[in-house]
Image: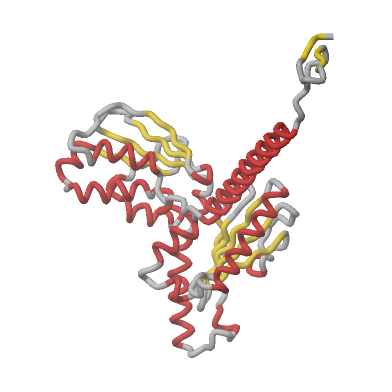
Amino acid sequence: MLLLQYHNLLLKSVLSERLLEAEPVHSSIDQIVSDFDNVTFHISTPEAKTQVVVSMYIKCFEDLVKYGANEILQREYGPYMMSPPEPGYNVSLVLNLEQLIQEQSLEQRQELVDRIALLKRNTLAAPFERAFAQFDQLAQDAANKSLDMYTPEAAGDTEVMAIHYRDEESIFVKPSHDRVTVIFSTVFKDETDRIFGKVFLQEFVDARKRAIQNAPQVLYSHREPPLEIRNLPGLRRSENVGYVTFVLFPRHLAPQRRETCISHIQIFRDYFHYHIKCSKAYMHSRMRYRVSEFLKVLNRAKPEIADKDQRKTATGRRFRA
């Protein structure tokens, strides 16, 4: 299976041409780029060719702000933030190309390009970073009280963070003292998608049993939401809705693994449906190939049809009747 990229490739390419090349490109640009999850980027040079504005619109930005998105954006892109952002977008960054080339080294500019290409990823990381911070606090409190992991008092009463990143789909994050639970609600618009999805998710479960013991636990429930979110308002209960649960244990939440964990888990829904579509496309191509081969066999099996107006003599010579 292929892993999808976390950064926006076109955004990285445009900025690399203007900040990293030996002879930087200075040309006007006004381009709208669509990314996964209906995220939209606008790259433009509204005032001068040496000033690039990068704007992003993401549907769930208001949800992310509640969980600390502004603090993360300020931490990652503080000097480049534009306030207020470009109309119609949630976040805007302004880059003065000439100033950056003069004041920063090539390595610093490369690091900046990589960070800006991860603008969507860093914005979506807000609820996960908050959940990991709450996990650290709850685990410390449980350790100070010498509570066993199965003690109900150890779990604490934590908020379920909901990110409504699509029209009918959401991500739910719930921290606890011994784990962080991440739940994806996903809609299958086709019956075959639901069947393919069940096969894929069963592979996730079986892979953990067979060889990858350190992988997160994966659970799948059809129609009925998991217990962690069952009491939340607005949940859909339909034949076309499925819930995928990832249980992240302390070994997955080690400080050196957290950034990678956030990158992997937030793109799971796109990865999941991407491979469903790839599998359907592959099966359709194989079906077309088999039909083509069967037609060739049938064509070879047809007897040669002689001309009805011709007759054969005893010696095999032909003549017209």
Q: Is residue 289 left or right of residue 308?
A: left
Query: Which of the 4 quarters of the picture holds residue 201?
Result: bottom right
The residue at 67%/69% (across/down) is 227
Residue depicted at 61% across the width and 52% down the height: 169
Viewer-nearest residue: 269 or 2:
2
User: Residue at 68% across / 64% down in the picture?
Assistant: 221
Name, please, the residue furthest toward the left. 102
The residue closer to the viewer here, 50 or 188, is 188
- The quadrant of the picture occupied by the C terminus is top right
- x, y percent for residue 25: 24, 31
14 and 302: which one is in front? 302
Closer to the camera, 207 or 49?
A: 207
| 290 relative to 244, above or below | above
In the rendered image of this protein, does residue 103 appear above or below residue 249? above
Q: How is the image coloured?
A: secondary structure
In the rendered structure, the answer to whether residue 310 lies left or right of residue 28 reads: right
Q: Position of residue 104 (x, y in %)?
A: 17, 47
Residue 261 seen? yes
- Residue at 30% across / 35% down in the picture? 52
Dividing the picture into quadrants, the one containing residue 162 is bottom right
